[in-house]
Amino acid sequence: MISYESIAYGGWPHCARLSNGRVDLVITADVGPRIIRFGFVGAENPFFEHPDHLGQTGGSDWRLYGGHRLWHAPEEKPRTYYPDNAPVSLAQAGDSLVVTAPTETTTGIQKTLHITLAQEAAQAHIVHRLTNRHVWPVTLAPWALTVMAAGGVAVLPVPPRGSHTEHLLPTHSLTLWAYTDMTDPRWTWGREYILLRQDTSAGPQKVGMYASAGWLAYARAGTLFVKRYTPPQPGAVYPDMNCTVETFTNQLMLEVETTGPLVTLAPGQSVEHEETWHLFRDVPVPQSEADVVTHILPHLHG
């Protein structure tokens, strides 16, 4: 049975909490759309919460806040950084919650999250929707960013390997940013997995990839967070030199990100991007590819 209650959280007086007794979600109503928490009931929040931004509302400055947010790619200032500092509407739809933000005045885009918590499992399904409320077509891609608490390790599966004789042409792309340092010891560049460690004493790092596995993960303090996403559509073009997944870190947090394909929305049209989240207890933080195989893959295929 899913319970729904209105609560105060993090200094915001108006939030919604969904719980199945095993895990809970907290969604802010005073700003957003934001899912500020997804964790085991009574346990620490695996999502990052920015101590300087909690409880704040209004104003024209974009704030990180923390938690999970919806953007539209490609990333540009000021378009992408439209401040989500205004109240959102919350509407129950059965066991789901629909969170709708006001239309962005500068872009004409409206953001909606359709959130469904599993009846018993430590699992949630999120449908991200972008709608063009403008009077002309807009080209964009849905971009789902989950901001994780410091001190963990992100895991990105590399597309399947093959042989030189069978694969003469490239099979996927790896995208680097101007500040990406491949010699940084926080990276593990494996044959089947890329690992990125969050370090509170180190600066920004980012990488993106055209990945087909349909999942990426973050492990921290014994808790494993996995997000599954729709595998790439054949022939579709994705943002950031064809990235379907990305990860970014700085001294505060680490983000695990997925994108949908670039589309041109006519006025009134929408595009959706879906993720399914999973939480697992008592999972060691991986330090190597072997650890991923031993400690993470059993949860994905169990």
Image: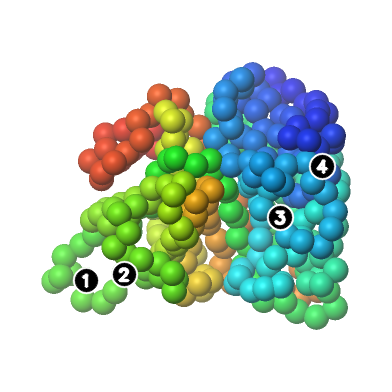
Q: Callout 3 environment at 10 Å: few (<14), some (14 to 19), or many (20+)?
A: some
Residue 137, located in which quarter of the rendered image? Answer: bottom right
- Foreground disc of the pair 2, 3: 3
Q: Is residue 231 visible?
A: no
Q: CA distance from mark 1 to mark 3?
A: 45 Å
Q: CA distance from mark 1 to mark 4?
A: 50 Å
Q: What label does residue 167 carry, if any?
A: 1
Image marks 1 and 3: residues in contact by CB distance under 8 Å:
no
Image marks 2 and 3: residues in contact by CB distance under 8 Å:
no
Q: Earlier in the sequence, mark 1 or mark 3?
A: 3
SS under mark 2: loop
Q: Nearer the viewer, residue 254 or 19?
A: 254
Task: Identify whether 242 is placed above or below 8.
Answer: below
Residue 193 horizontal/vertical position (percent): 30, 52
Residue 50 horizontal/vertical position (percent): 64, 44
SS under mark 1: loop
Q: CA distance from mark 4 to mark 2?
A: 43 Å
Q: CA distance from mark 2 to mark 1?
A: 8 Å
Residue 212, located in which quarter of the rendered image? Answer: bottom left
Image marks 1 and 4: residues in contact by CB distance under 8 Å:
no
**For the residue marked with disc 3, what is the amino acid?**
Arg
Q: Earlier in the sequence, mark 1 or mark 4?
A: 4
Q: What label does residue 171 carry, if any?
A: 2
Query: What residue is disc 3 on?
Result: 63
Residue 82 horizontal/vertical position (percent): 75, 65
In the rendered structure, the answer to whether residue 288 lies left or right of residue 24 reads: left
Residue 230 horizontal/vertical position (percent): 52, 54
- Foreground disc of the pair 1, 4: 4
Q: Earlier in the sequence, mark 2 or mark 3?
A: 3
Position of the C terminus, as image quadrant, is top left
Q: Earlier in the sequence, mark 4 or mark 2?
A: 4
